[in-house]
């Protein structure tokens, strides 16, 4: 493959041309360029067709995806195909990635390499989520995007950390590298990235599909939360450089989860993977159970893998149970419940009342800044972004939290004395023990006595 030249014009399939401005990056299948398309700056992915098994079928699949449109707003979808040049090469145009988004690969490694514009030297810069809330919001967004993709009958086929870009302040997610996405049952030679491929692909018994996507998704989520490979423990690290056969055994035929409750042969290496153990202890048991299932039963039986809606409900619950204490510490409510049922900050000992919903197992600590999402009221609801309520400081009783209605829907609040009040948009109610709130078909109650914590 001969790369495109700066200033070169590339014909677009249905008219016009894109002028090459510079190189954005390169990968296994080709190179991505910055281009000017009729005054709009876009990205052009240009393929090395020698690395594609069936170029014509591959191109036709991208054209079909363009016609179908993206399954969700989070996908950076192909928009226009280029013409095929005399060497049979081609590419497609897509939107540029916004500057504030960083590749998930850098998030997982906690740093990124940045070139100094004056010296050209590479410097490491930290890449961290601004909060635990942003981290879990990113997980929800990734799961939701994959859920929408699978709902339209397509699979991602090469699901790994390089395919996602994250706004680490908000947890917003953009899914890129969408050119390998294909209808269920179709594959164009891609197998996946080592460490993310399902065991049956590593063994050569299957090609990527929705079921293998589910395994890769579990690996991705584990890496996001625990910053580690779920199968890379003492047994794998002790083998040194993995040969092809050793890798097949470790990730295909005989993989062992580093926290498998029935097999301790591949535990994290003390002194080298201590952070993984600390993070494992930090998360609630129901999160651990989900990953244990994924990397034990789900290793050999694809039907035992968690589906996207299960991951979605898990992370919705987990995000709702975050306690962001005013001392700056973050924990999960279920980890630090007192005998009286309050949530206690493990760092400063401050206690918080808890809001419990009648239709799920969420126990949300009531602290200023906590936002009630519509998906917490109905875990099966697809909208994971809309906020319906927020905990704010009571204007009439400083230091006392109140719950504000952020929707046009009229809430009904029953106070401890039995009186019932309508709560309209923008209004709220104090957090008192025994307070019951009706939000549509959902009822919530404050579990514990008044706790001042501002």
Image: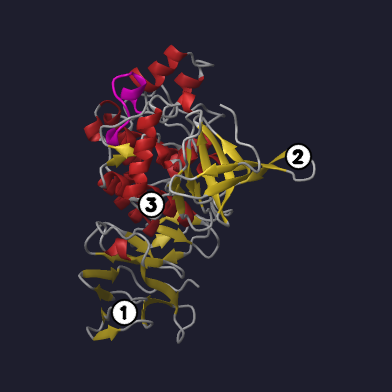
Give the residue at x 27% y 42%. 307
For the residue labelled by badge 3, is the local secondary structure a helix, a strand or a loop?
helix
**Whether residue 387 is visible:** yes
Disc 3 crowd rating (10 Å Cα; few below 14, some 14-19, many 20+) is many
Disc 3 versus disc 2: distance between alpha carbons?
Answer: 37 Å
Residue at (46, 20) in percent of width and height: 236
Residue 386: horizontal and vertical position, in percent? 36, 66
Q: Is residue 353 above or below residue 396?
A: above
In-front residue for pair 44/14: 14
User: Gap between marks 1 and 3, in whole Å?
Assistant: 25 Å
The earlier-in-sequence mark between 1 and 3 is 3
Q: In this view of the protein, which residue sits in the foreground, 422 or 358?
A: 422
Above or below, 222 relative to 261: below
- Tag 2, which secondary structure? loop
Q: Which residues are magenta?
A: 198-211
Query: Which residue of the protein is positioned furthest toward the left in this rendering?
Result: 441
On the image, the x and y values in percent for residue 216 come to 37, 35
Tell me which numbered mark, 3 or 2, is placed earlier along the sequence: 2
Res. 190 visible in picture: no
Relative height, residue 356 to residue 305 (above, below): below
Q: Nearer the viewer, mark 3 or mark 2?
A: 2
Relative to residue 13, is residue 7 drawn left or right?
right
Please name whichever residue, 157 or 53, is drawn nearer the observer in this view of the structure: 53
Label located before the other in sequence (2 or 1): 2
Residue 174 marker: none
Colouring method of the image: secondary structure
Residue 120 is marked as 2
Q: Which residue is mark 1?
A: 408
Q: Is residue 268 magenta?
A: no
Which residue is the site of mark 3?
140
């Amino acid at each position: 493959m001969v790369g495109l030249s700066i200033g070169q014009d590339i014909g677009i399939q249905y008219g016009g041309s894109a002028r090459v401005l510079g190189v954005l990056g390169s990968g296994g299948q080709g190179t991505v360029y910055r281009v000017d398309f009729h005054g709009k700056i876009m990205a052009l992915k240009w393929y090395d067709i020698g690395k594609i098994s069936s170029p014509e079928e591959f191109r036709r699949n991208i054209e079909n995806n363009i016609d179908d449109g993206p399954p969700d707003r989070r996908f950076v979808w192909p928009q226009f195909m280029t013409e095929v040049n005399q060497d049979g090469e081609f590419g497609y145009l897509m939107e540029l990635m916004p500057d504030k988004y960083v590749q998930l690969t850098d998030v997982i490694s906690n740093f990124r390499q940045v070139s100094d514009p004056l010296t050209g030297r590479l410097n490491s810069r930290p890449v961290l989520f601004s909060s635990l809330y942003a981290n879990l919001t990113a997980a929800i967004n990734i799961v939701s995007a994959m859920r929408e993709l699978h709902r339209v009958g397509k699979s991602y086929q090469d699901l790994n950390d390089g395919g996602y870009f994250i706004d680490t302040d908000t947890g917003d997610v953009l899914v890129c590298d969408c050119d390998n996405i294909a209808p269920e049952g179709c594959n164009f030679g891609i197998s996946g990235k080592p460490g993310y491929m399902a065991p049956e692909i590593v063994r050569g018994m299957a090609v990527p599909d929705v079921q293998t996507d589910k395994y890769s998704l579990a690996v991705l989520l584990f890496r996001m939360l625990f910053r580690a490979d779920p199968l890379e423990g003492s047994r794998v690290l002790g083998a040194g450089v993995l040969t092809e056969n050793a890798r097949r055994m470790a990730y295909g035929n005989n993989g062992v989860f580093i926290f498998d409750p029935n097999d301790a042969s591949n535990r994290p290496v003390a002194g080298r993977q201590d952070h993984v153990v600390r993070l494992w202890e930090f998360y609630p048991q129901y999160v651990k159970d989900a990953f244990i299932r994924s990397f034990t039963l789900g290793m050999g039986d694809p039907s035992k893998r968690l589906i996207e809606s299960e991951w979605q409900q898990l992370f919705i619950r987990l995000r709702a149970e975050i306690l962001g204490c005013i001392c700056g510490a973050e924990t999960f409510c279920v980890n630090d419940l007192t005998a009286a049922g309050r949530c206690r900050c493990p760092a400063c000992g401050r206690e918080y009342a808890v809001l419990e919903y009648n239709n799920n197992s969420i126990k949300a600590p009531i602290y200023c800044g906590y936002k009630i999402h519509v998906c917490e009221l109905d875990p099966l609801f697809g909208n994971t972004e809309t906020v319906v309520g927020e905990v704010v400081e009571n204007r009439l009783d400083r230091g006392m939290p109140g719950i504000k209605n952020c929707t046009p829907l009229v809430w009904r609040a029953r106070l401890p004395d039995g009186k019932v009040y309508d709560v309209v948009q923008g209004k709220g109610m104090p957090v008192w023990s025994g307070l019951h709130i009706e939000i549509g078909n959902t009822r919530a109650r404050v579990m514990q006595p008044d706790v001042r914590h501002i």
